[in-house]
Image: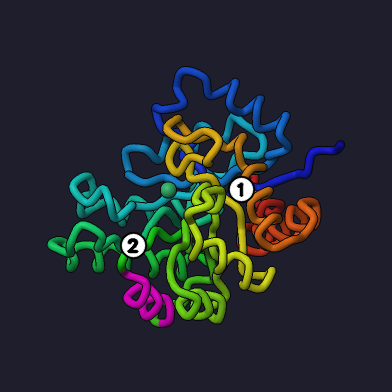
Amino acid sequence: MTVATLVDTHCHLDFPDFDADREQVLAACRAAGVTRIVVPGVRATDWSRVLDLCAWHEGLYPALGLHPMFMADHEQNHVRQLDDMLREQNVIAVGEIGLDFYHGDDDREAQLALFEAQLALAAKHHLPVILHVRKAHDEVLSLLRRFKPPGGIAHAFSGSRQQAEQYLALGFKLGFGGMLTYERSRKLRELARQLPRAAIVLETDAPDMTVASHRGERNSPAYLGEVLAALAAVRNEPEENVARWTNANAASVFAFDTRKTP
Ligand SMILES: [Zn+2]
């Protein structure tokens, strides 16, 4: 059986979790047909690590951003640095950025200011955005309408059908990952069954959000086929078809083939 070619639209392959065996993980990806991986940066201090990793490996594509869960690490001048990086470097998206009000919203104003500044940069540099959103879909949607970045992905989507449709209306895709492989993810599976094909992209979010078969272990982009299998099963479609249209969706967000040459 030929292995379907797959795109992991969200994987933190630069994290130290992979330092001991990153090359083996990449070899496992190739064997599993995972040929393209988007690696989003989350802090300014990590950006050069993300860029180096992607420069040295075919099929790895860097995104750069300031993640809302690392507010303590972000400094005033990082947004200006990001502006420079987006102009000078070979970057495929702005991300991972967003709003996270899961643990309350003590830093609400700071998160909003940072997110707005990065949305403005995405619009300025004509780059899609990779969004991290928890307990903040309505705020994020209204800011997307205001800043109009050229599309992107709401990663690890777990909102309502109505919120999903608002993202789609704005030209966004929704990222589905390991959660889909759990039987207990009823609401999420039902959403994945109902959404139009044009809505969905695959992701692992490795090292987090492990698939059911590797529960409790580190997640790997090489397990993306299990997410594909779960999605194909809930939609009652052949895996190869689902692979084809999810790849096409990913390619409609990210300009994989037209990156600037370094
Ligand atoms: Zn992430």
Q: Position of residue 209 (x, y in %)?
A: 45, 44
Q: Nearer the viewer, mark 2 or mark 1?
A: 1
Dominant SS in magenta:
helix
Front residue (pair 164, 99): 164
Question: Residue at the top extreme?
Answer: 20
Q: Position of residue 90 (x, y in %)?
A: 55, 47
What stretch of residues is rendered in magenta?
136-145
> Relative to residue 27, is residue 106 depicted above or below?
below
Instruction: Name the side, left or right, on which 48 lies relative to 222.
Output: left
Instruction: Name the side, left or right, on which 229 lies relative to 148.
Output: right
Q: Residues within 10 Å of mark 2 (few under 14, many from 20)?
A: some
In the rendered image, residue 53 lying in the magenta stretch gets the answer: no
Q: Give the mark nearer the N terminus: 2 vs 1.
A: 2
Residue at the spot of label 2? 134
Q: Secondary structure at mark 1?
A: helix
Residue at the spot of label 1? 227
Residue type beneath disc 2: Arg
Question: Residue at the left extreme?
Answer: 106
Residue at 39 percent of width and 68 percent of height? 119
Q: Position of residue 122 (x, y in %)?
A: 45, 65
